Image (cartoon, rainbow, N blue to C red):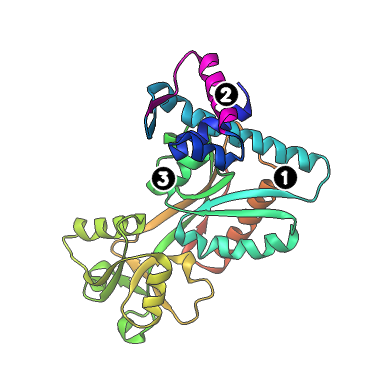
Amino acid sequence: MNLEQLRSFLAVAETGHFTKAAAKLHVAQPTLSRHISGLETELGSELFNRARGNITLTAAGETLLPVASRMLADAEHIRFQMHEMAGLRRGRVRLGAPPSMCVSVVAEVVGPYHRDYPGVDLHLRESGSHHLLNELVGGTLDLALIVASEHDPASAESLEHTPLFVEELVVVSADPQHFVGHEAELSLRGLADMPQIVFSESYDLRAATMGAYRAHDLAPNVVLEGAEMDAVLRFVERGLGVAVVPATVLLDRPGLESRRLIEPSLTRTIALAHRKDVQLSRAAGAMQNMILQTVAELAAQNPAIRLIEPEL
């Protein structure tokens, strides 16, 4: 089994077509067919159902797919590590984060990191924590910021989780009239009557907020739902309503006021994850250190963000 065979297998699995897979890899179709045939012979199983115009994976192919993807990702990781060991000022960091982290912690980190390490290629994957954990296991990410309080770290035994901080969910508004009579804090009951912008159903934030409403037999006054993080913040800035967001997203948003939410107080835990069986490259290690430093600085500035001290 070699990397060329695995690349050919993945290309056919992704395209569902031998000709398209050969074009994607810039090889002749007979060459690609030989790679697949040799792989099937070595494994003793057919990997594809070859119906005319419809190439699908067999059970053996389905089993091989995540393994092959991870093997190729690991091979590329080793290649980058060798470049670093050779003293080259280059590298790559594949960082994943939920949308709320992309507009806060990641936004604070990327600029300084690029300034300090201009030769490193940065790849950012914005998605929910569940998808990011799967991509870490599959080897397509080096590091990921995840909402650990919504996803049991034990569900991914192959990953190392470093808890970073606990942050409160706060209520934000651009209209001071919304917070009249609520100088520092706002109860969930008081929030329920305010015009509220609600996130897409794919957001853990929405699930947490709606769960709290149901637990207290309340219902929000929703004026808009289904928006993504950037859109929610823009709608709030334009006075359309209030929103419940993590405390970290208020960085560099002077046009927004916030109130801490009480009765109940809602929080979430953010962690940094990577694979246990793959040593972080120097480039990824530098990114990890910069994230830790940035998080510590944010926690020192905002009482709604509590740093989690590492266990000794």
How many C-alpha atoms fall within 10 Å of the one at disc 3: few (<14), some, or many (≥20)? Answer: some
How many C-alpha atoms fall within 10 Å of the one at disc 1: few (<14), some, or many (≥20)? Answer: some
Is residue 81 or residue 217 the one in the foreground? 81
Query: Which element type, helix, strand or loop, lies under badge 3?
Result: helix
| Quarter of the figure with the C terminus | top right
**Residue stretch rendered in magenta on the structure:** 29-51
Q: Which residue is mark 3?
A: 130
Q: CA distance from mark 2 to mark 3?
A: 37 Å
Query: Which element type, helix, strand or loop, lies under badge 1?
Result: helix
Q: Earlier in the sequence, mark 2 or mark 3?
A: 2
| Quarter of the figure with the N terminus | top right
Asked if the stretch drawn in magenta spans residue 128, the answer is: no
Q: Is residue 99 left or right of residue 123?
A: left
- Mark 2: amino acid: Arg
Tag on residue 34?
2
Looking at the image, which residue is at 25% across and 76% down?
A: 194
Looking at the image, which residue is at 31% across and 72% down?
A: 186
